[in-house]
Image (cartoon, rainbow, N blue to C red):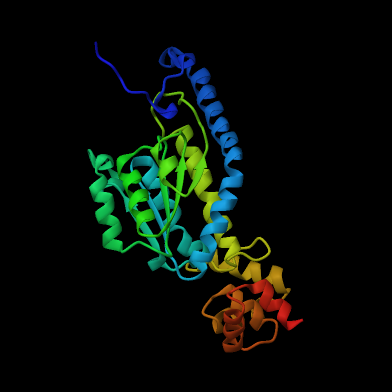
Amino acid sequence: MTTFSALPATESTDPRFADLDAWPPAVALAAMWEGQMAAVAAVGAALPAIEKAVAAAVPLLAAGGRLAYAGAGTSGRLGVQDGVELTPTFDWPHDRVVLLLAGGEAALTGSVENAEDDGAAAVADLDRHRLGAGDVLLGIAASAATPYTLAAIKAARERGALTIAIVNSDGPMVRAAEHVLLAETAPEVLAGSTRMKAGTAQKIMLNLFSTLAMLRLGRVHRGLMVDMLARNAKLRGRARRMLHQLTGADEAAIDTALAATGGRVKPAVLVLSGLSADDAEALLLRHDGQLRAALASLA
């Protein structure tokens, strides 16, 4: 008799959807939408764990550590998406983001067969980037068992990195990582298609983790992206609006301040408060980039 190993919840079948392909389109669509809402709700249980993981990661990142992402398939691509957006949004140094995707860059736009099963490749990827003590690794997998991601977490932890698992089921990664962000999304409407509920929950947890970390690192001020890189017309306009909101200065003064600070909002706020560009940079440095603290010191 053929036997099958127990499946993670995200790979299981929900009998409610056995006739999904025969349902009227509106009914099928509503069921899928409800699944997405359930994924959002599932993240709620992970909020305390996200807060603790950020608290553990921030001191390492503040001291110069790198933020690394590891995953395969949808999970890996979601990690890449979160990581690449840190630099334009928060001016997080590009060389302090490490993206580990099973199958490499080819897996961004296509399927690389068997890559997710190659744990040795994950260890080699870690070695190539010299990931270790002082760094933070986010390992992402719906099943909590993907061999590539599990191997990355184990190797990173052995090398002294802080390890955080972002998962949707109980599995080996839950026991391998120091921190576990678990959103139990259960079976998918389309069985095994974890790009749906599980992927939605992973994206939310990544958004929450990285944004809270950047907030705690002083890269947000009064709910504004004051460290963003204003590299196009839309973002240059946003920088001007932020400076007007924060200082009340007129457009001419704002443009002068931005020109003096290379288009950077935080030092421009201080320039508009009466400092030279050099003094603004020095003050921010003394306060670890925290604009709120820098402004308080001028009061």
Q: Give the vertical position of 95 relative to 10 (above or below).
A: below
- Is residue 233 visible from the viewing direction of this image? no
Residue most toward the right?
299
Q: Toward which corner of the image does residue 215 lie, by quadrant?
A: bottom right
Identified at 64% across, 73% down, the residue is 291
Number of marks present in the image shown: 0
Q: Looking at the picture, how far across and down is residue 38, in whole percent? A: 57, 30
Q: Position of residue 93 (x, y in %)?
A: 44, 68
Answer with left or right where residue 292 lies relative to residue 194.
right
Q: Picture quarter containing residue 223?
A: bottom right
Q: Nearer the viewer, residue 98 or 61?
A: 61
The answer to whether residue 223 is above or below residue 256 is above
- Position of the N terminus, as image quadrant, is top left
Is 54 on the left or on the right of 269, as rendered?
Answer: left
Q: Is residue 26 visible?
A: yes
Q: Quadrant of residue 126?
A: bottom left
Identified at 43% across, 13% down, the residue is 18
- Quadrant where the C terminus lies? bottom right
> Measured along the vertical axis of the image, is residue 122 above or below residue 279?
above
Residue drawn 43% across the image and 41% down it: 175
Q: Position of residue 195 (x, y in %)?
A: 41, 35
Q: Position of residue 77 (x, y in %)?
A: 37, 46
Apparent side of residue 193 relative to residue 202 in the rendered image (left or right): left
Q: In the depicted view, which residue is nearer to us: 245 or 164?
A: 164
Above/below status of 217 relative to 123:
below
